[in-house]
């Protein structure tokens, strides 16, 4: 199936979620060369998902945050075994497992599971987006709302940006920020140094909800340039297309960026 078997993908995510929950609040944490944390759960979940994908789709490529890079020709799976590892490591609930499927750099299917909160999100090019069993069509914010909704931001936003929007929240998970834009909880999201495994999972959900992404400069985001795992070269704003420009004008990059 071109979009992948969504039922199979969500089963994999729930299986991986059991691994994460088994060591939640007591993870074994190490730090990578860039000082980002990694846990044994990250490694074990990545191994599980890679094994499942290889068995089900042996001709597909796989790119994952913790180092897996399996070459493929037409289809590529992008995996983040735990998106929000810092939150996971200190016992906060906003983390999840992300799977995205691309065909020649075009996102086809995205799925994201937050085990502690029991929240499952998924969409394909032609179906969804879904939050558990609820269709999210029409939930995204289409009008300016600075009284109730918030702008989702990175946890270090206060160091890197001057933000004029009155309400900001950093939940710790990039994909959570994207799906909360899709479901209308956040008016938009500011993403910094995101990689393919976050966008591949969250972008189909956001797009099917009516959302879009642009670089903070206003330039379009070329997913093809991120296919080798490099982070996006500049900040990204995610929201309904009618709101992206106005949100971008609320955000200024400090000199430290």
Image (cartoon, helix red, strand yellow):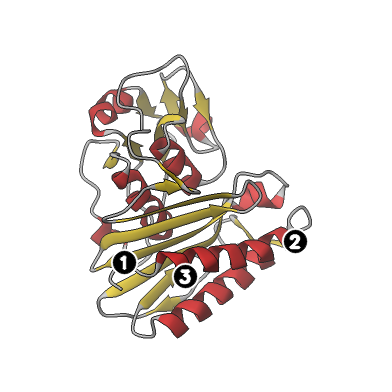
Q: Distance between the residues labelled 1 and 2?
A: 32 Å
Most foreground residue, 33 or 237? 237
Q: Residue 96 carries which label?
A: none
Outermost residue, top direction?
Answer: 147
**Total numbered badges shown on the rendered structure:** 3
**Quick check: 204 above or below 182?**
below
Q: List x then y, in percent, for residue 61.
A: 36, 77
Query: What quarter of the picture does the C terminus occupy?
Result: top left
Residue carrying label 2: 23
**Quick check: 184 above or below 33?**
above
The answer to which image quadrant residue 155 occupies is: top right
In the rendered image, is residue 257 in sight? no
- Which residue corresponds to the image point at 56% horizontal and 38% vertical from the top-left? 171
Residue carrying label 1: 3
Outermost residue, front direction?
Answer: 133
Tag nearer the camera, 2 or 3: 3
Q: Which mark is residue 8?
A: 3
- Which residue corresponds to the image point at 73% horizontal and 47% vertical from the top-left? 91
- Which residue corresponds to the image point at 42% horizontal and 43% vertical from the top-left? 178
The answer to which image quadrant residue 31 occupies is: bottom right
Q: Provide the secondary structure element on which disc 3 rests.
A: helix
**For mark 3, does the 10 Å Cα neighbourhood hold few (<14), some (14 to 19), or many (20 or more) residues?**
few
Label 2 near label 1: C-beta < 8 Å? Answer: no
| Left or right of 105, for residue 252 | right
């Amino acid at each position: 199936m071109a979009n992948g078997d969504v039922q199979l993908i969500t089963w994999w995510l729930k299986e991986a979620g059991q691994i994460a929950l088994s060591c939640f609040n007591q993870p074994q944490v190490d730090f990578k060369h860039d000082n980002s944390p990694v846990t044994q759960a990250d490694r074990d979940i990545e191994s599980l998902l890679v094994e499942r994908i290889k068995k089900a789709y042996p001709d597909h490529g796989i790119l994952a945050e913790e180092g897996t890079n399996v070459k493929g020709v037409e289809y590529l799976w992008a995996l983040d075994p735990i998106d929000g590892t810092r939150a996971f490591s200190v016992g906060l609930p906003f983390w999840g497992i992300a799977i995205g499927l691309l065909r020649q750099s075009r996102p086809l299917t995205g799925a994201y599971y937050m085990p502690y909160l029991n929240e499952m999100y998924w969409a394909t090019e032609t179906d969804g987006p879904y939050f558990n069993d609820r269709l999210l069509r029409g939930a995204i914010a289409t009008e300016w709302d600075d009284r109730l909704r918030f702008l989702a931001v990175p946890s270090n936003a206060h160091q890197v940006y001057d933000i004029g929007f009155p309400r900001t929240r950093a939940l710790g998970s990039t994909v959570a920020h994207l799906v909360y834009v899709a479901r209308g909880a956040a008016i938009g999201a500011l993403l910094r140094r995101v990689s393919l495994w976050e966008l591949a999972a969250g972008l189909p959900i956001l797009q099917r909800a009516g959302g879009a992404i642009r670089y903070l400069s206003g330039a379009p985001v070329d997913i093809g340039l991120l296919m080798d795992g490099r982070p996006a070269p500049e900040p990204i704003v995610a929201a309904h297309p009618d709101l992206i420009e106005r949100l971008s004008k609320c955000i200024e990059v400090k000199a430290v960026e």
